[in-house]
Image (spheres, rainbow, N blue to C red):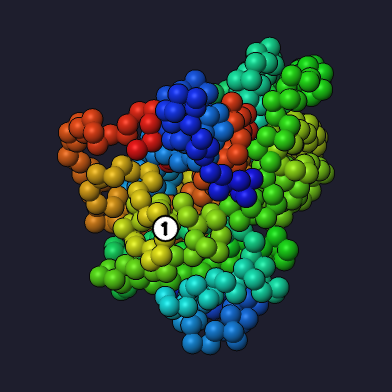
Amino acid sequence: MDEEISTKESEVSREAGELTVLLQQEFPDAVTGFHAHRGDETVVIERDALEPVCRFLRDDSRCSFEIMMDLTAVDLLEMNETPRFEMVYHFKSLTHAHRLRIKVRLAEDDCNITSIHHLWKAVDWYERECFDMFGIHFEGHPDLRRILMYDEFEGHPLRKDYPIDKQQPLLELKEVEERHIYGRHA
Amino acid sequence: MTDMIGIQPRTEGDSTGEDFSASIMSIEIGPAHPAMHGIVRFTTHLDGELIVGMDPEIGYLHRGFEKESENSKWIQVIPYTDRLNYVSPLLNNIGYSMAVEKLYGIEAPRRAEFTRVIMGEISRITDHLTCLGAVAMEIGAFTFFLWFIKAREYLWELVEEMTGARLTTNWTRFGGNANDLPDGFLSDLADRLAKLKDVMSECDKLLTRNKIFIDRVKDVGSFSKEDALSFGFTGPLLRACGIPYDVRRADPYSVYDELDFEIPVGSVGDCFDRYLVRMEEIRQSILIIEQAADKMPDGPYMTDERMMHYPDKKDVYGNIEGLIDHFKLVMEGHQPPAGEIYMPIEGGNGELGFYLVSDGGGDPVRVRLRPPCFNLVAAMPAMTVGHYVADIVPIFGSVNMIGGELDR
């Protein structure tokens, strides 16, 4: 059984892909790790370098990532890893037909990361969802509200320490004045 | 349209001196409105009939798909994926199963892949039929809606024949499908496709050159290529803007690289282009299904890898390996190797991506769905500002919002 596990783990390739090498050249201090699993190239970078790296990925002609495909987070609480959170960014280039995954590690007591909403318009809602589900704060986001949950929701449901059967308190009806005044924009 | 976002309201008063026009009126559309597909609320800010601002509010259909999946076994997620896009549930089944197969590093047998292609394209057609039918109905073409829903019924009967259910299909497995083609399925398929083609040509005559329809959709909701890419559009809406990005061609999965089909593109990305792209995609999907049915190879419909499916009963009762495999699959479930993958497929609305993280155990660490219509609904303000209230109906209809995958 042990032997089986070790062969399985070795399936994660440690060879640096083309884009990884490029990022290592351009941002030697920022790249802290990389791997590829089933051909998905992944680069782990420092938190502070996120904005310049993303800008480079969008604008450089060797990268040309026109589409910000997906943005999410992973809570590694049950895997006993520190730091606890991993931000995951997926990019897709139509020009070069390649994909890249960028990861940033975030500590539990410092869940702040620079917002990249100004680089791709899709990021606005993705970051709102990530804030809603994981409680990660995106610095510089213009409108960081909950998106799937309601404003009064307590906690962040996709964190691993949020119990799946947790009950939320019943909300009292809002006063009429606080509600949106129908027909007239206040 | 984005340059019109800065429109200022008219400020002149009327003859009585009372200033009626100075304020912008806010109207709530939805959450339960006949023209809303599913439950979504738009707070629109209007200057007369002109939309000057819009704030979509989503989340009314949030069921905690991702949380629920992370508290289930890998195989138990498949029924949940039925409920994501409820007009093309099979595509979600296929997407998730292919993602887990990628995590394992295995492939389904060729016969299973060809069957998946057929069922996936049937689902894409039902998705487009529903979307186009609903758009047409909302702007007055009721006959078109009825004919398309009739055509969708032909296909859903095929889905029922294959999976036993119309909506809650739960049909794919890791490394294959739940069952092989039923007897006589391919002849039924040919029969239904012939009927569908009749409906398509009739409806094409009815609507494509219909002035009333064209007046409502042409130059409504136009979107530039740059904005579409920046908003992360995929699927028919991106192709309507003129960008031929289709996951089936760009990152070929399954057996799509062996099949011959074309990717229709539009030019300005308005609602009429979206209509034309979807109509052509239905025809292309019919071609794909016919080719896949012709090329259908013989062989197993499920992989013979160990620990992917329950062993045969004769092995469970007859030898120790079968018994152990059975026991471990029941007690521990599938255990994909540790790692993380992102697997995109072309869903009805665009790129349907699953991002899965495994620690090598029986429970997923992370199941993330990239819902294609999330980006489309996010762009609703940019698409509608500068248009009139009545244009919300065709624009939102062509977005084809599916609450199940949007809110998860």
Point out residue A152 in the picture as x, y percentages from the top left corner: 24, 44
Query: In the drawing, does residue B312 fall left or right of residue B239?
Result: left
Q: In which quadrant is the N terminus of chain A drawn?
A: bottom left
Disc 1 element: loop
Q: Residue at x 53, y 43 (%)?
A: B8
Asked if one can make out residue B285 in the rendered structure from this viewpoint, the answer is: no
Q: Nearer the viewer, residue B286 or B182?
A: B286
For this rendering, which residue is in front, B194 or B282?
Answer: B282
**Which quadrant holds residue B360?**
bottom left
Q: Quarter-wise, where is residue B387 in the image?
A: top right
Circle 1: is it few (<14), some (14-19), or many (20+) Cα within 10 Å? Answer: few
Say if B161 sits above or below B78 in the image.
above
Say which amino acid is labelled 1.
Pro
Q: What residue would you read off at disc 1?
A: A142
The image quarter in which residue B61 lies: top left
Q: Position of residue B252 (x, y in %)?
A: 70, 53
Q: Residue at x 35, y 28 (%)?
A: A182
The percent position of residue B55, horizontal first and vertical second, equals 45, 41
Is A135 located above or below residue B270 in the figure? Answer: below
Chain at tag 1: A
Position of A92 with respect to A138 (left or right) is right
